[in-house]
Image (cartoon, rainbow, N blue to C red):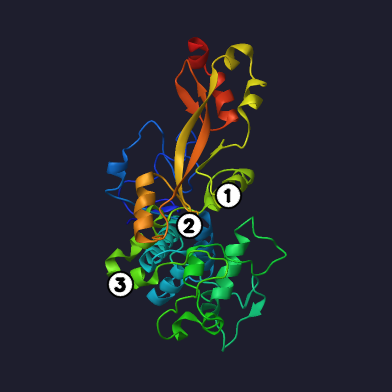
């Protein structure tokens, strides 16, 4: 792992999501991805090496805490990692990289020392620091981190200070209310396993986690093992709702466009020559677990997840994305806007 990486990923191997950011890729809806669809790699190659990908919420939380405190202990990295779904060493390396970047930036300005927070209160939680409660004590508590997460999530209602958690890693590591209020360095004993919720949401297999060697723990938090929640996919909220409803109804698949629009809308906005070039093409782009609803980049990854975690269910729910394809150019686009931009290029005009 190096400090040269962007904020959304750590590590030096092959980027499993390197081709997924471009909406021309069937999996462009997955977060934290970068690269071009012109350099696609096979699933076999992708499975050999991976880097840790950070969600916007994870980066938002770590940035916020870094602004207040730049040198967390390994225990504090562990606690923060449990709250945001990252292994403690991933958190540790992120802070190391962040410190290195800040030192480099300050050195270019002639400064040598890292800036330390001199704040006497937490504006997020409206708490004053004192001898009994220091900044370091407070910012690594569950309550503070949850508020930071909520502030970075546009879907969380401002009217609810403590929304019901989704089946995420933060819920997996939930502890007793009394223990959550304690600073991390005052905590004693192992994290307690939460009881099964009344809603029937699948809980994390603690027996699996505690039985694994420490060196294998980072894989538990990899999206290729746990999957990507539907709410983290880069698709309109209306599409998320449709996927959730179809999953709950027990359907085998759902069909959608990445921009949430109908193909007929594209035809009505194009010139006749360009409209004649357009066609709708359906591609299977994701495979969801019917038990936990998380989405995977391939059916093989889903099956592996079901063998390891959601062992009570082997049903496959397919996400089918309708692409806007240009027949003469043999190119597919995820959104209507991208297709329109393509129609204005000289290469398209010469091919149509």
Q: How far across and down, in percent of the image, does residue 30 sit?
A: 48, 46
The span from disc 3 to disc 1 (Cα, nearest Å) is: 35 Å
Q: Which mark is residue 249?
A: 1
Label 1, residues with CA under 10 Å away: few <14, some 14-19, many ≥20: few
Q: Nearer the viewer, mark 1 or mark 2?
A: 1
- Residue 60 occupies which quadrant of the picture? bottom right
Circle 2: element type: loop
Circle 3: element type: loop
- Residue 42 occupies which quadrant of the picture? top left
Q: Nearer the viewer, mark 3 or mark 1?
A: 1
The residue identified by callout 3 is 211
Q: Quick check: marks 2 and 3 in contact, CB under 8 Å?
A: no
The residue identified by callout 2 is 291
**What residue sits 50% from the left and 35% below the top?**
23
Q: How far across and down, in percent of the image, does residue 5 sit?
A: 39, 51
Q: Quick check: marks 1 and 2 in contact, CB under 8 Å?
A: no
Q: How far across and down, in percent of the image, does residue 17 sit?
A: 40, 45
Establish if 194 lies above or below 152. below
The span from disc 1 to disc 2 (Cα, nearest Å) is: 12 Å
Label 2, residues with CA under 10 Å away: few <14, some 14-19, many ≥20: some
In the picture provided, is 27 more to the left or to the right than 143? Answer: left
Q: Nearer the viewer, residue 236 or 317?
A: 317
Which label's residue is closer to the chain start, 3 or 1?
3
Q: How far across and down, in percent of the image, does residue 46 sit?
A: 31, 44
């Amino acid at each position: 792992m190096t400090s040269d990486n962007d904020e959304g990923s750590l590590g030096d191997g092959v980027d499993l999501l390197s081709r997924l950011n471009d909406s021309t890729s069937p999996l462009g809806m997955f977060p934290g991805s970068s690269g071009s669809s012109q350099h696609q790699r096979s699933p076999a190659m992708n499975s050999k090496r991976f880097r840790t990908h950070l969600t916007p919420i994870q980066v938002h939380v770590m940035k916020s805490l870094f602004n207040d405190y730049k040198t967390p202990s390994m225990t504090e990295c562990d606690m923060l990692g449990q709250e945001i779904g990252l292994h403690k060493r991933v958190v540790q390396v992120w802070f190391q990289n962040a410190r290195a970047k800040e030192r480099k930036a300050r050195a270019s300005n002639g400064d040598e020392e890292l800036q330390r927070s001199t704040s006497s209160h937490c504006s997020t939680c409206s708490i004053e620091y004192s001898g009994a409660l220091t900044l370091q004590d407070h910012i690594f508590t569950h309550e503070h981190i949850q508020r930071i997460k909520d502030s970075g999530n546009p879907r969380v209602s401002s009217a609810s200070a403590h929304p019901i958690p989704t089946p995420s890693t933060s819920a997996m590591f939930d502890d007793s209310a009394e223990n959550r209020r304690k600073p991390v360095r005052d905590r004693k004993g192992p994290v307690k396993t939460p009881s099964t919720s009344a809603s029937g949401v699948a809980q994390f297999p603690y027996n699996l986690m505690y039985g694994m060697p420490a060196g294998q723990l980072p894989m538990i938090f990899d999206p290729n093992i746990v999957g990507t929640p539907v709410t983290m996919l880069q698709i309109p909220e209306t599409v998320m709702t449709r996927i959730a409803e179809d999953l709950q109804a027990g359907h085998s698949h759902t069909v959608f466009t990445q921009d949430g629009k109908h193909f007929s809308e594209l035809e009505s906005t194009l010139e006749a020559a360009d409209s004649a070039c357009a066609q709708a093409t359906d591609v299977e782009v994701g495979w969801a677990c019917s038990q936990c609803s998380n989405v995977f980049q391939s059916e093989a990854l889903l099956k592996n997840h079901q063998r390891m975690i959601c062992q009570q269910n082997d049903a496959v729910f397919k996400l089918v994305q309708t692409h806007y394809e240009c027949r003469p150019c043999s190119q597919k686009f995820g959104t209507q806007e991208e297709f329109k931009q393509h129609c204005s290029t000289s290469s398209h005009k010469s091919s149509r």
